[in-house]
Amino acid sequence: MFELYKGSLNVPLLYAKWYEAYKGANLGAFVSFCGIVRAEDMLEGLSFDIYENLLRSWFSTWQERVEKEGVKLCFAHSIGDVGVHESSYLAGVFSKQRKLGLALINDFVEDFKANAPIWKYDLIKGQRIYAKDRSIKLLGAGLLSDKG
């Protein structure tokens, strides 16, 4: 399940939707990770740009990777602005066993941080400022350079 939303995520609704979708799949664990925007410095929120086609491809690669284990992946992310104390990211793994689910959610989130085509901006004093110091260069993206 791959979902993108404008603005912050309705986490309780998504969690319940995913649970209802897979509770009968005979999988014994549902492990999730929810990213919440923290209040830091003068931050009013975060804003996100997404290259949807590449993100869908990245997610499909993950689905293929875990398919042989019978694992179901769920993913939701915000597009645009998300205020402090709201959620911009929710991921879920349904697996036969807890240990597999816990390992996969960690790997999935870490790979997302390193490879997903999503660009993050800080919202400060009504301005959208690229968060370069917290960004990772995506191979071939050209957005960040060694000189920049």
Image (cartoon, rainbow, N blue to C red):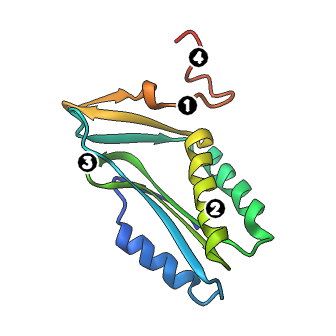
Q: Which residue in the protein does label 3 denote?
A: 84
Query: Residue 134, how many percent across, how many down?
Result: 45, 31
Single out the mark in the foreground, 4 or 2.
Answer: 2
Instruction: Tell me the tag on residue 88.
Output: none
Q: Are marks 3 and 1 in contact (CB under 8 Å)?
A: no
Spatial CA span between label 1 and label 2: 23 Å
Q: Residue furthest front?
A: 99
Can you say whether 6 is above or below 45 in the image? below
Label 1 environment density (alpha carbons within 10 Å; few <14, some 14–19, many ≥20) = some
Instruction: Tell me the tag on residue 136.
Output: 1
| Label 3 element class | loop
> How many numbered dots are placed on residues in this image?
4
Label 3 environment density (alpha carbons within 10 Å; few <14, some 14–19, many ≥20) = some
Quadrant of the frame with the N terminus: bottom right
Q: Is residue 52 visible?
A: no
Q: Which residue in the protein does label 2 denote?
A: 103
Tell me which label, 1 or 2, sits earlier in the chain: 2
Residue type, numbered disc 2 = Ala
Spatial CA span between label 3 and label 1: 22 Å
Q: Residue at x 44, y 73 (%)?
A: 15
| Label 2 element class | helix
Label 4 environment density (alpha carbons within 10 Å; few <14, some 14–19, many ≥20) = few
Residue type, numbered disc 4 = Ser
Instruction: Tell me the tag on residue 145.
Output: 4
Spatial CA span between label 4 and label 2: 32 Å
Q: Are marks 4 and 1 in contact (CB under 8 Å)?
A: no
